[in-house]
Image (cartoon, helix red, strand yellow):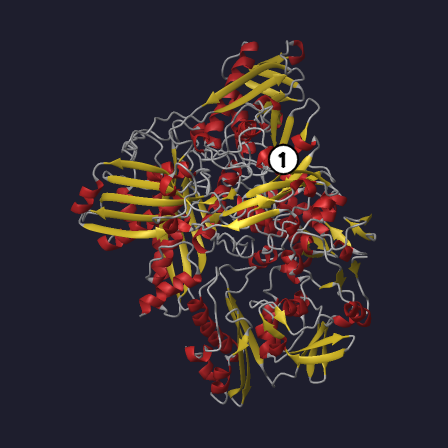
Amino acid sequence: MAERTRFTLNGAAVEIAAAPGERLSRVLRERLGARDVKVGCEAGDCGACTVLLDGAPVCACLVPAQRAQGRRVETLSGLVAQDPRARALAESFQDFAAAQCGFCTPGMMVAATALLRETPAPDEARVQEALAGVLCRCTGYRKIVAAVMAAGRRAGRRRAAEGGVGTAIRRIDGAAKVEGREAFGDDIAPPGTLEIRLVRSPHAHAAFTFGDLETFAARPGIEAVLTARDIPGLNRFGVIPAFADQPVFAERLARFRGEAVAAIVAAPEALRALAAEDFPVTWQELPAVQGLAEATAPGAPQLHEGRPGNLLCEGLVQCGDAPAALAAADVVVEGVFETSFVEHACIEPEAGFARIDGEGRLEVHACTQAPMMDREALARILSWPVERIRIRPTAVGGGFGTKLDLSVQPFLALAAIRTGRPVRLAYSRAESMQSTTKRHPARIHLTVGAARDGRLRGFDFTGDFDTGAHASWGPTVADRVPVHASGPYRVADYRARTRAIHTHAPPAGAFRGFGVPQAAFAQECLFDELAAKLGMDALEFRLLNALDEGAATVCGQVFERGVGIRACLEALRPGWAAECAAAEDFNAGGGRRRRGVGLAAGWYGCGNTSQSGPSTIRAGLRADGALVLHQGAVDIGQGANTVIAQIFAQALGVPLSALTLVGPDTDLTPDAGKTSASRQTFVSGNAARLAGEALRARILRLANAGPGARLIAGGGRLGVLDNGKTHEINPARLPADSEGYVLRAEKSWDPPTRALDENGQGAPYAQYGYGAQLAVVEVDMALGTTRVLRMAAAHDVGRAINPLLAEGQVEGGIAQGLGMALMEEYVPGRSENLHDYLIPTAGDVPPVEVMIIEEPDPLGPYGAKGLGEHALVPTAAALANAIAAATGVRPRRLPITPARLRALIRAAEK
Amino acid sequence: MGYLTPSSLDEALEILAHGGVSVIAGATDFYPARPAGPMPKLMDITAIPALRGIRKEGGGWRIGATTTWRQIAAAPLPPAFDALRQAAAQVGAAQVRNVATIAGNLCNASPAADGVPPLMVLEAEVELASARGRRRMALSRFITGPRQTALASDELLVALHVPAPPQRARSAFLKIGSRKHQVISFAMAAALVAPEAGRVGTARVAVGACSPVACRLPGPERALRGRPLAALAEPGLVRSEDLAALSPIDDIRADAAWRREAAGVLASRALHAAGGPADG
């Protein structure tokens, strides 16, 4: 029997009966209600669960609860309420936008509070060191470090909570994040809720048979065992219905390590007493294909019927005559470039809660980027009408593309329906890494030519992308890459062919850029080689060939306005010259350390590729005077909650504080599409603008006021000031509809695109965003280690709706690109945790000079363009080019680990 | 009761003699390695005062088993311990260093354990105790392979004993990963150098993460004895033939060829850092 453990939690005496060795994190969250303690890895790697134990930061996941006996435990919510340093941090984190998704924020702020208690005004290195134990995947750390330094010095710049388009206001959801009140996927379920454990394949390819499931299911505490035969509808899902091929539970055959074959639903204690070997399943390992070469070899095991050669699909864009142009080119370069599986490593593992409500409807609360798609997919799996399913997205602790696909949702749904009781499921870090989507590894063969004058002459790209066991977003990558592989340049003679190939690996899906960063790595590196061969400066070469307004893209699309690549490249010009000169000076000193400067550019088409992808935003005036915005665009940390509201408020002509916000919920918010493809600011932003304008027009009409009238809103009243006179509108006197609205507006917007023909010619996107980055690195030539000293990034966002949040997107994208370039490589079975799979820490992201370029887009709301993905597109290429400049060797495989780089240097020394 | 917190060593050893418990201290390696299923019976040894702290002992030093990395990093130890203190400051992150113990690092016996090379150049011994008695052995004999030690099932590692370092000895520790913090070493080296009349009196160097157990490099240690201190600055101080005892592996962090080469570079640099001009 468990003995009682007594300690103080945030100053209050508590007493619990923890199981022997129960993790303190679990006790705090499940027995003491401290859901402000987040669990990200249960291995001490991510630090999200950091609490103070007698004042010292510890990972609560590694502390046996019994060790808290007689001691003081402090968590974020208590610190913010009681410690002025934590309070100062809470303000500073909001002023600097240091919390994006907010999942690491409790760990960050607790660690920072301990630091400020010890060192009231720490320097940057000290802050980085103190925060190094907490991983963040959104921000790139720079704003966090700045926020902590400013809080220590009480010297931060205050940001307003109010402001229209173009104003760097605080996030409207920031306070909840910094006070530990934000509820993520695993924060909804009440303690004691039934839990789900999944039985997963230990092999990349295996046949399996179950033993006696009935006897197993009769064990005490087990409520249900679910397998493929328990699926009433279709045991198949996929984000692109035409390619849907992923089973909820594998049937007879598992196609990747970590694929689920069964689920055990049980009370928490019963589940914890189960060992893996208790479950009756027998595995027969089968030959597996890993990597593109094995998958395409003759006689390779085949993953899916009807996809011979393990070929999922192909993509093509061509214009002019690339082979002929290359044959006639004065200078030609070519190379083969390879990249690895990259894990999203959201600090929040996938998690959720489901229940059957009083009317027999299913309600799923989970972290997701695509609630409407989740609902449709569940309807097919359950064979239920969509109306019986309600998706209520929780706060999302990082997404970056991976939370577009279903993860926990079908298991939650099936278990809740089977048991009739509420259920919860939170993936362990290992499960999350094994089973959720990855960035596609690529093998790219590229040949590029130029005339003596530096103009591009011929571009021939072939790229194979390892899409893993199931389709996921593989077709999108195969389609997007050929459209983007030219980079933002004028290429008259172009051919880009792609293939998505299946292997026995986790499905590769959407990850910030959909394959474009991989393509940019090849293209931008070869552009450096081409410029060198031509004897041209790398920046001048890019400017000479940069896409212009009025010039055709490789798809034959012409943009008359809003092409910002030239402005981005020009913005880097002063830094480029100065950094190149400084590196040359440094290297003239000799020594084992060499510095180099690299450039790369990128672009990104915002929205779906040549497909309809509308957003709808609803708004209204309620009888009680509330101006309500129904905003269904999921904020995964990037700031949609704030940006969409800023746009709407601007269009309506009221302050943000006058709005009542209704967040994503398939019952309450119309479809704002998925949070992907850099589309929310652009597409949902436009819908919000139209909805705001429409509601404004209706209000003005009521008051018979002209278009220049001012709305005076707040405190239940709505006035219209027109020509010096105020018309009072009394909503209570107006007839209300069934939802309580006396006035309402609902507007959709769909970016105009045109289908691509068989040569990929058409208008795939209504707008592109553009960016260019510069990196300065230092390489230790004897060890092959790379230190990134500085970066500069110029990104054309059309119009920065909120410049503070835009900066955060750029810094965060750079941190992920830096990880992809230098350290991140997911190897199934070998790097299924955050100490073998490394992502950048607070000490790894250098100062980043962010330059926001505003070339207004004619279609964007107030000129705005999407930003999320082009923030990352050029980063790995810029770093690779900087490393090449420093070392004289050319890395063609990512990540550029010390061992790989040193091998290249060693070969060059011989 | 499945969670035992003995308050004396004798009590702990008696529990161990009966068997059936898993020993935890910082528990930072215990939890991540734990499979799903029932929790074993645990014995938490961090409440035993005799296992804690650092003290002088004869000419040398005794470091208690449950001394944390944070305590070691902050301890007022002589310069011969600099390598150990530098390693202590780089084990995991602050959250881990606040609870993880030196004995846990040794008993976990990872080939990449940061504590081992610095303790090897200090020629540390481990003290093992059981209800049967006590014994001491060199650290280099205690760790017998990856995740393997000479610890008997009824024994506890109670302390480390570091003999008096040579006069004026200094040491240094270097480790390499692909990021700045929270690094599990791809390769690491520790070196200790004691000057004698302007020359190298004693030189010791050990390399970790490049063989199943970290190891000393006797070749350069011998060759350096009696040479001018300036020789420590020579490039290629440690040559490839000095690394014959290493058996680095290919893994996801680095390949064997890089490890072998990096071991030489790090060993040379650590020797230079330990014996080069003092900072003041």
Per the image, label 1 sits on a secondary structure element best described as: helix
Query: Relative to B19, does residue A54 appear above or below in the rendering?
Result: above
Residue A42 percent coordinates (x, y)? 64, 52
The residue positioned 29% from the left and 52% from the top of the image is: A335
Query: Relative to A190, does residue A584 appear above or below in the rendering?
Result: below
Q: Is residue A418 visible?
A: yes
Residue B104 percent coordinates (x, y)? 67, 67
Total numbered labels: 1
Q: Identity of the amino acid at label 1?
A: Leu
The residue positioned 52% from the left and 80% from the top of the image is: B275
Residue B46 percent coordinates (x, y)? 75, 65
Chain of the residue on which disc 1 is drawn:
A
Q: Quadrant of the image for the C terminus of chain A?
A: bottom left
A906 and B37: which is toward the camera: B37
How many other residues sit within 10 Å of disc 1, few (<14), some (14-19) or many (≥20)? many
The answer to whether residue A891 is left or right of residue A537 is right
Residue A524 percent coordinates (x, y)? 33, 48
Residue at the front extreme, as displayed: A212
Residue on which the image places disc 1 = A412
A430 and A44: which is toward the camera: A430
Q: Is residue A489 visible?
A: no
A645 and B117: which is toward the camera: B117
The image quadrant that residue A550 belongs to is top left
Query: Relative to A223, does residue B177 appear above or below in the rendering?
Result: below
